Amino acid sequence: MNTVIGIAGSARKKGNSATLMRAILKGAVRAGAHTKEVYLNGLVFKGCQGCEKCTSKGKCILNDDLTSILNELHKAEGWVLASPIYYDSVTGQMKTFFDRCRTFTIDPETQKLKPQLKGKRKGVVIVTYEDKPRKDYYHEAEKLANYLGWMGDFSKVEIVSEGKLGPRDAAENRPDLLARAEELGKDLFG
Ligand SMILES: Cc1cc2nc3c(=O)[nH]c(=O)nc-3n(C[C@H](O)[C@H](O)[C@H](O)COP(=O)(O)O)c2cc1C
């Protein structure tokens, strides 16, 4: 059975990005996957210290709430990253998490860049925002999607970039969007 982990980068558990993340995970469950939701804002973790110890040890030497999550992500066939756009970028929580994924990009034998996640994977990067649909915000999601390729063999990474989602409950009141997200999860992780 596939394991799909959703990483939510918003403090608003019931907000737009997390709501879309859960819809995708719901679709993954329909397709037979085992899922887990991670809310970064509820965790205590440091940003990457740039110590580069992971380049020789093969894992991050920091020991905090992210440690076990990184271990689980090491094995998960599906990654769903969800973040609102804050000042034209993903949230600090998402960026801090993503920096810690550096450990997945370096081969400890050679200290050179080489994806460390074994096996094939699939992913989704979700960004939600208030403004009208914007290409530069799509690109923010695309940047994370591209870097997933530095970590492992992500054969497919879908991007969900949804504008006009200002208020907290905006996504919840868009059954069309939720249905599309659920279908995406079912198709991608089935
Ligand atoms: C600090 C902050 C910065 C924001 N910056 C932007 C922005 O640059 N562009 C935009 O369109 N929306 C911006 N927004 C609106 C959020 O992206 C939008 O409400 C999003 O859907 C919230 O997602 P959430 O409910 O998952 O937290 C900002 C909101 C906050 C709180």
Image (cartoon, rainbow, N blue to C red):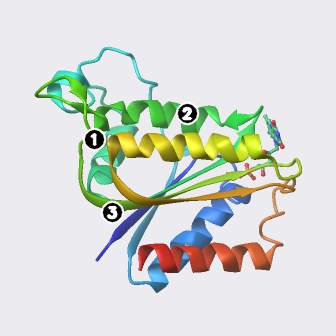
Q: Secondary structure at mark 2?
A: helix
Residue 17, visible in the rendered structure: yes
List the single residue furthest toward the top: 51
Above or below residue 52? Residue 35 is below
| Residue 30 on image: x %, y % | 48, 85
Q: Earlier along the polypeptide chain: callout 3 or callout 2?
A: 3
Q: Give neighbour class at mark 3: few <14, some 14-19, many 20+ (Cα, 10 Å).
A: many
Cα gap from disc 3 to disc 2, whole angstroms: 21 Å
Q: Quadrant of ligand 1?
A: top right
**Dot label at residue 77:** 3
Observer-nearest residue: 13 or 98?
98
- Residue lying at 39% horizontally and 45% vertically, measured from the top left: 149
Q: Secondary structure at mark 3?
A: loop
Cα gap from disc 2 to disc 1, whole angstroms: 19 Å
| Residue type indicated by callout 3 | Glu
Front position among marks 3 and 1 = 1
Dots 3 and 2: beta carbons under 8 Å? no
Q: Which residue is mark 1?
A: 115
Q: Earlier along the polypeptide chain: callout 3 or callout 1?
A: 3
- Residue lying at 16% horizontally and 26% vertically, measured from the top left: 57
Q: Which residue is mark 2?
A: 95
Q: Give neighbour class at mark 2: few <14, some 14-19, many 20+ (Cα, 10 Å).
A: some
| Residue 35 on image: x %, y % | 42, 69
Q: Earlier along the polypeptide chain: callout 2 or callout 1?
A: 2
Q: Quadrant of the N terminus?
A: bottom left
Front position among marks 2 and 1 = 1
